[in-house]
Image: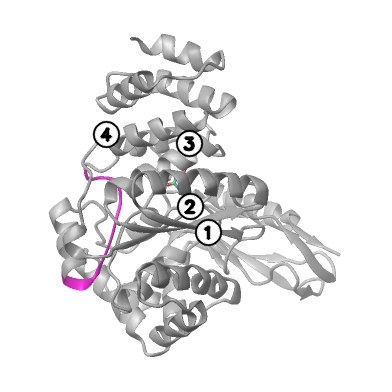
Amino acid sequence: MNIQEIIANKRDRKKLSEEEIQYFIQSYTKEEIADYQASALIMAIYINGMDEEEITNLTMAMAHSGDILDLSELGTVVDKHSTGGVGDKVTLILAPIISSLGIPVAKMSGRGLGYTGGTIDKLESIPGYKTNISIEQFKENVKKIGISLIGQTMNLAPADKKIYALRDSISATESIPLIASSIMSKKIAAGANKIVLDVTYGSGAFMKTKEDAQKLADTMQKIGEMSERETICILTSMEQPLGRNIGNILEVKEAVEFLRGKGERDVEEVILELGSYMIKLAGKGENLEENKQKIKETITNGKAYQKLKELVKKQGGDISYIENLEKFKIANYILPVIATKTGIITRLEAEHVGKISVELGAGRIKKEDKIDYSVGIVLEKKTGDYVTEGETIAYIHANEKEKGNEAVKKLQSAYEIK
Ligand code: URA
């Protein structure tokens, strides 16, 4: 078997056999296949797709490219994953909430992908926070404090780590086989037995329509069933960015504020919806409305906020930044974006906003790029808000003036005011 033949088969729309898929995943993980060859195959999959059997084989090969964790000694462990969004800081908020309710959370997250942000980049913007702890430490943390959030630096789904970074740099993100295998391989490897998936649709999501999001959800649910992980998918709209802040430090700050009881309405809706299902799946409450109340309580009584601090501390992070948000680095330039006319904001496309934040340095253009944690966007006004000409509708946080001015112009034209 050789990689050229496999690339040619997918290029010519042929179905790949289980052996071909395993060969590709194993050889690429061992670095016996070059990035340019893997890129060609990934792009052929992106363009020509895969059937259900191929997607399952790809997922299983990726999950088994490293260790598969067994967390059964910890009882019911829940995990949550989003298919991606702009301003999506849900994990930073929801994981401590669920853990504070006595449900163990063990989660392996990803980095930014395309114009969407990644939880790992956000966590790494907290000074000292280690996302690459050992498997033993990961388990130990879940056992001791009921929560651990890590990246893919351990030997868990290493194939996904490599393919994910490649997809990010070759514009091969919006694909059902590639997203389903990426997410489900991580979930299978990380060992949680109950999974809630937030499947996003709309401008800032990889699935632009609800129908495609449903197809992606069905594919992941089937893989979940097959691998004996009870999986629930919830479809959520990502037409405009979630919450106010986009960018790594900015999103950590918004997440902390949320846990201190100052949450944005749209973020709260997603938290309550996903969280109520996580509690149900964990067997801690059949009634979704009552579960939502439990979530509100654990925020109000400060337990969820304490759990976030416990998590950050346990993983080496400096909690004085969480306690005192002013300690975080602030970008060199904070530039206002001004409304060009009076009226109602009728559109603010999340994809557009996400791309502006990547150009500012909040995401990667090449896979080797370093993230600039302090840059991003703060939205003062969103769809449905009334604005008057000359009013500040957003702020650009930039470290380079030229990039900042460019971003101001782009964001101004991203707002549709009627
Ligand atoms: N999240 C992932 O882990 N992978 C994807 O492909 C998209 C979102």
Q: Is mark 3 within 8 Å of ligand 1?
A: yes
Whole-angstrom CA distance, mark 3 to mark 4, is: 16 Å
Q: Position of residue 417 (x, y in %)?
A: 82, 64
Q: Position of residue 307 (x, y in %)?
A: 29, 77
The residue pinned by badge 1 equals 376
* Residue at position x 21%, y 49% in the image: 69
Whole-angstrom CA distance, mark 4 to mark 2, is: 30 Å
Q: Report the quarter where the C terminus lies.
A: bottom right
SS category of the residue bearing label 2: helix
Residue 65's tag is 4
Q: Which numbered disc, 2 or 3, marks the residue closer to the eye?
A: 3
Whole-angstrom CA distance, mark 4 to mark 1, is: 35 Å
Instruction: Using the rendered view, name the quadrant where residue 215 is placed.
Output: top right
The residue pinned by badge 2 equals 362
Colour logic: one colour
Disc 2 to disc 1: CB gap under 8 Å? yes
